[in-house]
Image (cartoon, rainbow, N blue to C red):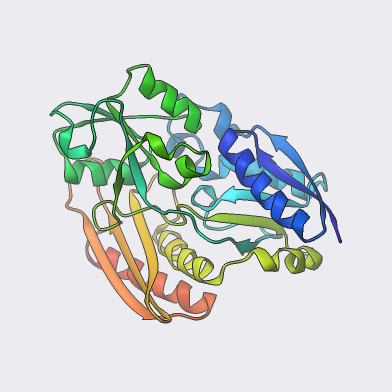
Amino acid sequence: MLKLVIATRESRLALWQAEHVQSLLQAQGHQVGLLGMTTRGDQILDRSLSKVGGKGLFVKELEVALEEGRADIAVHSLKDVPMDLPEGFGLACVMEREDPRDALVSNRFASLAELPAGSVVGTSSLRRVVLLRALRPDLRIEPLRGNLDTRLRKLDDGQYEAIVLAAAGLKRLGLAARIRQVFEPQTMLPAAGQGALGIEVRSERPELLRALAPLAHTPSWLAVTAERAVSRAMGGSCSMPLAAYARFADGDTLQLRAAWGDPEGGAQLVRVELSAPVTALEQAATLGEQVAARLRAGGAH
């Protein structure tokens, strides 16, 4: 039995995720407390992440708490975690993935197709921007920052006709009824790691690796490793309009699809799909690197 502290952001969704991990660890007999923190990513809401430091703004303060010994583990939405962690840190496990898809939320329209030309749709994801433009070039895509509740409030205040969010977050907070349309991956390919939770630790804490091992879900971990390898090989920046999604199609055959687009609209979407037998993290990473190479060959950069 260990006495553990979980570092977490203080948004409602982040706290739900941390409390979910807390309950699983407590069920194993561990004593687990929470250390709530506000990160720079939560504080800077008037600029896009790509202009102020990227996804690392959501995890840096949590890593400092791990380094200083104020916390033992940090729970992250994996799509918010930089592709390369600082020296001395590592992912102890990836948990079973929730719904990886994107969702349309609107108070007036039941689907993307029903939105009138010129409607304002909110998202701050460059991936979603290029995929939405490919589907509906007649819409106005406007920036949308803030935690999930803030984004919903901006929609309800009438600033947008619709917004696009991760389905997983809405479902975890009991807000699935707000979803008007779920985008299948063949329509809007998800972000690398979307819907998955990752648990970060200091690398020199083997006792934590043992304690967290029962929470790991190997198929999810292999899939997101392949997706994140695409992003890492392409540069790993949140300023990159990249989508990557992997799923096991048949036995141990992992199917990995990726798409890259030009946020300025000057190039067509580049799409790649590859499959390979994958039973180890190294094989998953190799598949991701192969997909990235094909994206670059197709004109992605």
For residue 278, above or below residue 72 = below
Q: Residue 158 falls in which quadrant of the image?
A: top left
Residue at 54% from the left image edge and 61% from the top image edge:
96
Residue closer to the observer: 19 or 232:
19
Image quarter of the C terminus: bottom left
Query: So how many labels did they put on this image?
Result: 0
- Could you tell whether 26 is left or right of 17 in the image? right
Answer with the quarter of the image where residue 212 lies: bottom right
Q: Is residue 7 visible?
A: yes
From the viewer's perspective, tell me whether residue 110 is left or right of residue 215. Answer: left
Q: Is residue 238 visible?
A: no
Residue 78, placed above or below residue 233: above
Q: Position of residue 69 (x, y in %)?
A: 83, 48
34 displayed left or right of 125: right
* Residue located at (18% from left, 50% from top): 267
What percent of the width, then of the height, locates residue 181? Answer: 29, 42
Residue closer to the observer: 8 or 19 = 19
Q: Residue at x 53, y 79 (%)?
A: 280
